[in-house]
Every structure is written in C-alpha cells, then in structure tokens.
Amino acid sequence: MNLKNVCIILAHPEESRNIGSACRAMANCGIECLRIVGCRSDYDDERVKILAIHAAEIWERAKFFSDIKSATADCVLSAATTRRRGKKRKGKLFLPEEFCEFAKNSSDGKIAIVFGNERAGLSDEEVASCTVGVTIPSSENFPSLNLSHAVQIICYELFRAQNPNEKGFTPIDLNRLEKTIFKISQSLEKIGFFKLAGKSDMENFWRGILSRAILSESEAKYIEKIFTKAAGLASKNFLSKPQELPLDSAAKK
C-alpha cells in the first residue's frame, strides 16, 4: 500500500477549520490527497489555513465532487467511516487497524476513506455507496468524534501499517544485560567496594533491579558510562592525594 494512493474524502463538512485540522492530520502521516464532496466556495479559505498551518497545500490541491460516487470512481476500495451499525450500514465494520491490514492486501490502486458531516455523519445511502465500513471505538457516553480527530486516527493507522518496522522502544535481552552487570561489578571492584559487600550478592542485586526495569540499549550504555566514570574519578582522586600513614605506623616513626 502506497500512502500516495490514499485519498481522504470529506462529505459535506460544515466547519472550515475542521478541514484545516484534517489537512494537518493528513500531512503528519504523509497523506496528501484530499477530496471534498461540496463546493470550494462554501468554505472560508482563511479559516481553513489557520488550522492547516504548514499543510495548507493539501487544501489548495483539494478536488471537489458532487457526490461520493464520483469522488471514489477511480478508487479500487472505498471505506465509509461510521459509529452507527445496522443492516444498511455494511453489517460488519472494520476497526481502523483491521481496515489497514485489509487495505495492505488490496492492489496498488487508489484507496478512499470517507468521512461524513460533523453533525449527521454519513447517511445510509452514502455508506451504501462505499465498498466497506470502518468504525472507531469510543465511549458510549460520548461516542461522536471530532471530524479531524477521526481523520487523524485513520491516517495514523495507515501510516503505521506502511511503516511496521519503526520501533519506539526495544528492550535489551538478558544476555546483553550481563554486559552491564559486568561493567557495574568491574567498576565497584576497582574502588574497593567488595571489601564491604560480596561481589556475587551485589551482581544479583543489580541483575534483579535492571531486569525488572526493562532497559533500552541507550539506557544500558548510560548506566555503564556512569559506573565507569565514577570508578575512574575515584582512582584519580585517590592517586592525586598524599597517602596518610596509619596512626600506629606514624607513631613508630
């Protein structure tokens, strides 16, 4: 699935600022094709651009259509977004992540995701004009999402589906953790710490704490750096200071 082939379609949006926010949401996720069912003259260009900020080009390149059918005519897949279920509303509705997985397996043609009017959403007829339905779960006490928020959620899921290998956090394994334990133990040994505590007990202490912390590679390296530097500074300070003789030795002299 190529994000360049994804089209966001807004069907009769009411608020110009929502269009601007939708443009920004699209730009965040690398999606650039905006289509609107309605007339450009119905919207305030300045109000759109206030919230679009640096994504105003998406609005400027937006295409306008008379209905959803014509807006999706060149697409191989069109998804109606709705929170309401029913026989006339596609029956089965995909969750956003399910739809993205489904879309990935489609051909390389254009894919449309259709969002309805802020107050009424998509009508039964508009939903029927699409090939599948998508719903975004939300609280039963307040189920209606802001238009641009719904666009952001779907665009984000499409972006993540296109970039599955992007990781926010990768924990080190236990084999890697042993390197950090060794560095800590080695540093403490250099400053004579184990004259007061057993080396094995201390290693087990750090092993238990750091394994529960689920460290990243950068965190493990930072901890190693702290202990290595502390040991180095301790040794430097020890060598730079004049060594005092024990009291009993001084008395003999």
Image (cartoon, grey):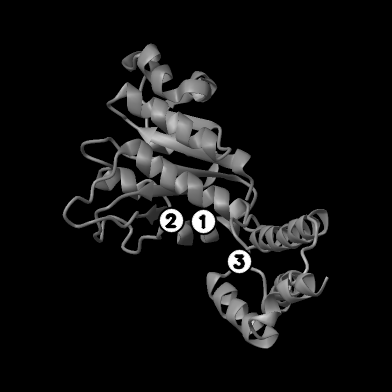
Q: How crowded is mark 1: few (under 14 residues within 10 Å), some or many (20 or more)?
A: many
List the single residue furthest toward the left.
141
Q: Is residue 73 visible in the rendered structure shown here?
A: no
Please state the horizontal and vertical placement of residue 219, each as a whole percent of the image.
64, 60
Does dot 1 land on a helix, a strand or a loop?
A: helix
Of discs 2 and 3, which sits in the foreground? 3
Mark 2 highlights which residue?
96
Image quadrant where residue 38 sits: top left
What amino acid type is highlighted by mark number 3? Leu
Which tag, 3 or 1, sits closer to the chain's start?
1
Does dot 3 land on a helix, a strand or a loop?
A: loop
Against 12, residue 133 (above or below) is below
Asked whether, in this view, residue 36 is left or right of residue 237, the answer is left
Placement of the C terminus among the 4 image quadrants: bottom right
What amino acid type is highlighted by mark number 1? Cys
| Residue drawn at (45%, 24%) of the image | 52
Does dot 2 land on a helix, a strand or a loop?
A: helix
| Residue drawn at (80%, 75%) of the image | 252
Q: Which of 66 and 213 is in front in this view?
A: 213
Q: How crowded is mark 2: few (under 14 residues within 10 Å), some or many (20 or more)?
A: many
Q: Nearer the viewer, residue 213 or 188?
A: 188
Mark 1 → mark 2, Cα distance in angstroms: 6 Å
Asked whether, in this view, residue 144 is left or right of residue 193, the answer is left
Q: Residue 249 carries which label?
A: none
Q: Residue 100 carries which label?
A: 1
Q: Residue 215 carries which label?
A: 3
Please state the horizontal and vertical placement of residue 55, each as a whole percent of the image.
51, 25
What amino acid type is highlighted by mark number 2? Pro
Which tag, 2 or 3, sits closer to the chain's start?
2
Q: Are marks 1 and 2 in contact (CB under 8 Å)?
A: yes
